[in-house]
Amino acid sequence: MNMTEVNLLKGKSEEILECDIVDETGLNDFQKLPNKHGVAIPSVGIERFRIPLKFRHSDGEILNHDCEASMSVYLAADKTGVNMSRFCAILQEEANKMVVDKSFFKKILGRYRVDLRDDISESPIEKSFFDLKFNYPLKQQSLKSENWGWQYYSCEILGVENKDEKVELRLVVNYEYSSTCPCSLSMSKQYEQDYREGKTTLGNGIATAHSQRSNARVEASIDLASEFFIEDLIELLRMAIPTETQSLVKRADEQAFAILNGENPVFVEHVARRLSKTLDQRSEIIDWNAKIEHFESLHSHNAVAYIEKVLQ
């Protein structure tokens, strides 16, 4: 290393050590230095923070669910950065006192706007964001037998608070169900009838309609003045699409499921319209959108439909 390189390294070392602001322990705090570039950042924070959080289920039982939290705030043009650890500390503190509900989100989002300021004399931060991802288990009764099992729903809750202190909350639920193709079902029954009548000798007289595991991802914006929450949205999806996959079945349940699929053959288009009719009837849902996907057992590709509420 020549002397020029040594001097450059020395200069960088001195630059790193030069900080006009220190924290309560005396360590340099570059995060609080004024930003010289004059560029605001719409959202800055952390993602994938793992934490167990308490949820109160409709039967009154409080259960811990493993969650991944994403937390961020708007960063003004004159600010260098935010105190990242404060996001986690606030969440853990409130999680010790509250269950996850609309009040919990209101509390967290409000504290982020206030507690992540560099100084108490500053106005609250313009915007805060708080999102949770988790699997939400509900007891599911078997269709025919007296058994039951746990059905898990991949969920998200997306929260935002603006400078007017208005909180917006969106629920996301992934709902798995079985879809039987109407065309395939019709062709199978047509073949069986032709075989019985001696019009064909192909096969053995039994044909199976193609069915597949399918998923509806529904995102709904919720009126915070209502009591509507996760289990209410799941119940609406069960009403719209009755062929939900089952967690525990005996033979009688399996036969009942086959009958249920036979009663409800659907394309993705059918499911999209069923969701539209069901979700639009609820005043607690301000707006919504959905992605419906059938993981085809016949084709190598998937059938997909997108639909959303048409706001008047």
Image (tube, grey):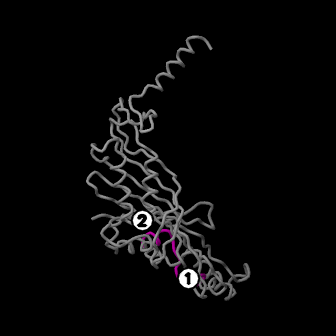
Instruction: Please name the predominant secondary structure of the magenta segment in the image.
Output: helix
Most foreground residue, 65 or 276: 65
Give percent across and percent down for residue 74.
Answer: 36, 45
Give percent across and percent down for residue 263.
Answer: 53, 83
Most foreground residue, 23 or 300: 23
Q: Nearer the viewer, mark 2 or mark 1?
A: 2
Residue 270 drawn in magenta: yes
Sequence-wise, the earlier of marks 2 and 1 is 2
Farthest residue toward the front? 25
What number of labels is visible?
2
**Label 2 – label 1 distance at C-alpha:** 30 Å
Most foreground residue, 133 or 191: 133
Q: Which residues are magenta?
A: 257-273
Q: Residue sitting at 32 percent across and 42 percent down?
A: 119
Place residue 23 in its image quadrant: top left
Q: Residue sitting at 46 percent across and 57 percent down?
A: 92
- Which quadrant: the N terminus? top right
Q: Residue sitting at 44 percent across and 32 percent down?
A: 28
Above or below — where is 103 with respect to 23? below
- Regarding mark 1 in the picture, which secondary structure is present there? strand
Residue 196 drawn in magenta: no
Query: Residue type at mark 1?
Result: Gln
Question: Label 2: which residue?
Answer: 98
Label 1: how many Cα within 10 Å (few below 14, some 14–19, many 20+): some
Question: Label 1: which residue?
Answer: 141
